[in-house]
Image (cartoon, rainbow, N blue to C red):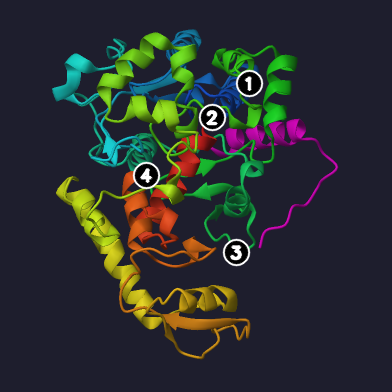
Amino acid sequence: MSVKHYLDENVWDASQKRIEYIFNEFDHVMVAFSGGKDSGVVLNLALDYAKKHDQLDKLAVYTLDYEAQYQMTTDYVTETFEDLPNEVQKYWLCLPIKAQCSTSMFQNHWIPWEKSKEKIWVRQMPDKPYVINRDNAQFDYDDWDYTVQDNFDAWWANQNDGKSVVLVGIKASESLNRQSAITSKQKVNQYDGKKWVTKKEGYVAAYPIYDWNTQDDWIANARQGWKYNHLYDLMYQAGVKIDDMRVASPFNDYAKASLKLYKAIDPNTWSKMIGRVNGVDFTGTYGDTKIMGWRKIQKPDGFTWKQYMYFLLDTLPEQTKQNYLNKLEASKKSWRVGGARDKKTIQQLVDEGAPVIRTGKTNNRGKKDKEVIKFDDYLDDTTIDNFRAIPTYKRMCICIMKNDTTCKYMGFAQTKEEIKKRKHAIEKYQNIL
């Protein structure tokens, strides 16, 4: 477990020392810039230092363009790139990558800049000499966005003579996972004994503002007079809390609740997004509400919940359907072995006549208030108080209707690929901001 250690030094001074170390240690420094507050601060820190110490030729900047994003973000990124000194290398990635899509029941990803969809692109591809697209990319981009960024970072590092590092705007204060990822005593991939610098596959990443919080971003912008994305001003006026402001890909899990803001803040972009990705209008309307009333949802007359589940699965693409079926079978197999539940839940199951198999065994931690129970098959539904403690076909139906392809609502364990995907999503979607 990682523990915070407070120093007699403020975060600004600490970041200045880190930036100095980076430029002294590495021959090439690239900033991952999304157009958000965190990556903007990191870029300004690096840019100010490089100007002051005549090291602009060391600096590079890249941005990953998701095609569908706030126009103010595009304008801010464009202005930033155009204002960069000539010595700074620039890379603007407009690639047909896989990006998470939580708005559609028919696909778990969408593809920005997909050639076959050019007529309905949310906006035209930037026409700049530093744009990297499908015609000139020299690295593998036929993959998920987080993997493509890793591929690009490794490719860039490999082009350089000497040591290279990529600066990323991760803040440990935003989650315990991020804090642990950077400061854990068990961290083995640290560079030069510094936990805020990490050895990746093919490149090195550094997190110079990992100990900042959101307020520090805005204090730095104000005191240093740095330019920033004024989209945040509109979000603030719209009542969004400063810790909830995001400018990442609009269709991923983290952005789903705030998708509706596009309607008010950027209606022109919103109107094009509706026709670009399935389910955007519905998610934008109901993404942050409880309008669906999941526990009270009804199935069609004449169906059991099991039958309705298979009916819903038959409406999905084969790959998506198989994903749910694989998780279902893994869960059934687990429940045939057994799971520990509290005595109240077990008694309620017995009272409603559920086919629960009682083993009389406590769980492996020896807690006597819980007993291991088994099921040969899922229950169709249950009336117990803690209905999410027991697997039912109704809950699987809810997962399908929620587009919950990881079955988080069921409490399923994530696969290794899903854990990897979530880890990268946290770093790329939320933290490079």
Dot placed on the residue nearer the N-terminal end, 1 or 4:
1
Q: Amino acid at mark 2?
A: Leu
Q: Secondary structure at mark 3?
A: loop
Magenta stretch, residue numbers = 1-30
Which mark, by number, is residue 239? 1
Which mark, by number, is residue 402? 4
Q: Amino acid at mark 4?
A: Lys
Q: CA distance from mark 1 to mark 4?
A: 26 Å
Q: Residues within 10 Å of mark 1 (few under 14, many from 20)?
A: few
Dot placed on the residue nearer the N-terminal end, 2 or 3:
3
Residue 54 located within the stretch drawn in magenta: no
**Which residue is the site of mark 2?**
433
Determine the residue positioned at 30% across, 15% down: 272
Q: CA distance from mark 2 to mark 3?
A: 27 Å
Residue 20 located within the stretch drawn in magenta: yes
Q: Disc 3 vs disc 4: which is toward the camera?
A: 4
Q: CA distance from mark 2 to mark 1?
A: 19 Å
Dot placed on the residue nearer the N-terminal end, 3 or 1:
3
Q: CA distance from mark 3 to mark 4?
A: 37 Å
Of residues 31 and 369, which is closer to you in this image? 369
Dot placed on the residue nearer the N-terminal end, 3 or 4:
3
Is residue 85 at all visible to an observer of this figure? no
Q: Residue furthest right?
A: 8
Q: Amino acid at mark 3?
A: Gln
Q: Disc 3 vs disc 1: which is toward the camera?
A: 1
Q: Residues within 10 Å of mark 2 (few under 14, many from 20)?
A: many
Q: CA distance from mark 2 to mark 4?
A: 27 Å
**Which residue is the site of mark 3?**
186
Q: Disc 2 vs disc 1: which is toward the camera?
A: 1
